[in-house]
Image: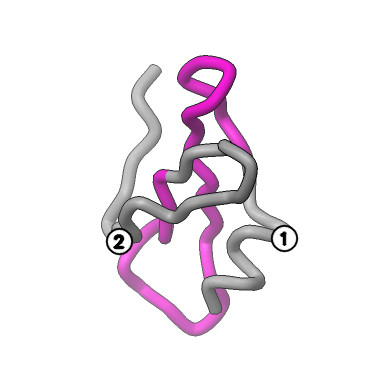
């Protein structure tokens, strides 16, 4: 599921190295699943959340 999230989720950037990737996963009823990630020389997943909501 994490691979699918990172490959096909919606991306929003906080700055040039930090971003969120979120996706409503089929079969889950707990809103969006989101990964907070950092792009360095590799993609580092800092945390994975559920019941996530985008801030406007």
With 44 as the anchor, is 30 left or right in this view? left
Looking at the image, residue 35 lies above or below residue 28: above
Q: Which residue is mark 2?
A: 50
Q: Residue at horizontal 59%, vertical 63%? A: 5
Q: Residue at x 72, y 60 (%)?
A: 7
Q: In this rendering, is residue 1 above or below 31?
A: below
Contact between marks 2 and 1 (CB within 8 A): the answer is no
Magenta region: 11-36
In the rendered image, residue 13 lying in the magenta stretch gets the answer: yes
Residue 23, compared with residue 38, is above or below; it is below
Q: Is residue 49 magenta?
A: no
Mark 1 surroundings within 10 Å by alpha-carbon count, few (fewer than 14), some (14 through 19), many (20 or more): few
| Mark 2 or mark 1, earlier in chain | 1
Assign the C terminus to one quadrant of the image: top left
Report the residue marked by disc 1.
7
Q: Quadrant of the N terminus?
A: bottom right
Element marked by disc 2: strand
Q: Tell me if residue 41 comes above or below residue 6 in the rendering.
A: above
Q: Position of residue 25 (x, y in %)?
A: 53, 70
Q: Quadrant of residue 29?
A: bottom left
């Amino acid at each position: 599921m994490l691979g699918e999230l990172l490959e096909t989720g919606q991306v929003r950037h906080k700055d040039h190295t930090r971003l969120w990737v979120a996706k409503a996963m089929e079969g889950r009823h707990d809103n969006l699943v989101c990964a907070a990630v950092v792009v360095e020389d590799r993609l580092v997943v800092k945390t994975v959340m559920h019941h996530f909501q985008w801030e406007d």
